[in-house]
């Protein structure tokens, strides 16, 4: 499982993270990922 917490991130980065991960709170992303997606992140 992957957890990413961001502050003051540009909207483009937040959008990219939202493609692969679930945003449970503002700036907090969680999810499972495959090796291919891990390389893209």
Image: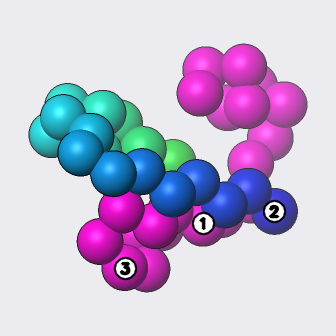
| Residue extent of the magenta highlight | 22-41
The earlier-in-sequence mark between 3 and 2 is 2
Q: Which mark is residue 30?
A: 1
* Quarter of the image with the C terminus in it: top right
Label 3, label 2: how far apart the Cα atoms are:
16 Å
Task: Identify whether 3 is placed above or below 25.
Answer: above
- Say which of 17 and 7 sits in front: 7
Q: CA distance from mark 2 to mark 1?
A: 7 Å
Q: Which residue is mark 3?
A: 25
* Residues under numbered marks 3 and 2 in contact, where contact means CB atoms less than 8 Å apart: no
Magenta includes 7?
Answer: no
Q: Nearer the viewer, residue 4 or 32?
A: 4
Q: CA distance from mark 1 to mark 3?
A: 10 Å
Q: Residue at x 46, y 67 (%)?
A: 28
Q: Residue 21: where, in percent of width, then height?
A: 52, 57
The image's mark for residue 1 is 2
* Of labels 3 and 2, the one closer to you: 3
């Amino acid at each position: 499982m992957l957890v990413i917490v961001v502050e003051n991130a540009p909207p483009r980065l937040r959008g990219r993270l939202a493609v692969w991960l679930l945003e449970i709170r503002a700036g907090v992303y969680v999810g499972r990922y495959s090796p291919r997606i891990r390389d893209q992140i």
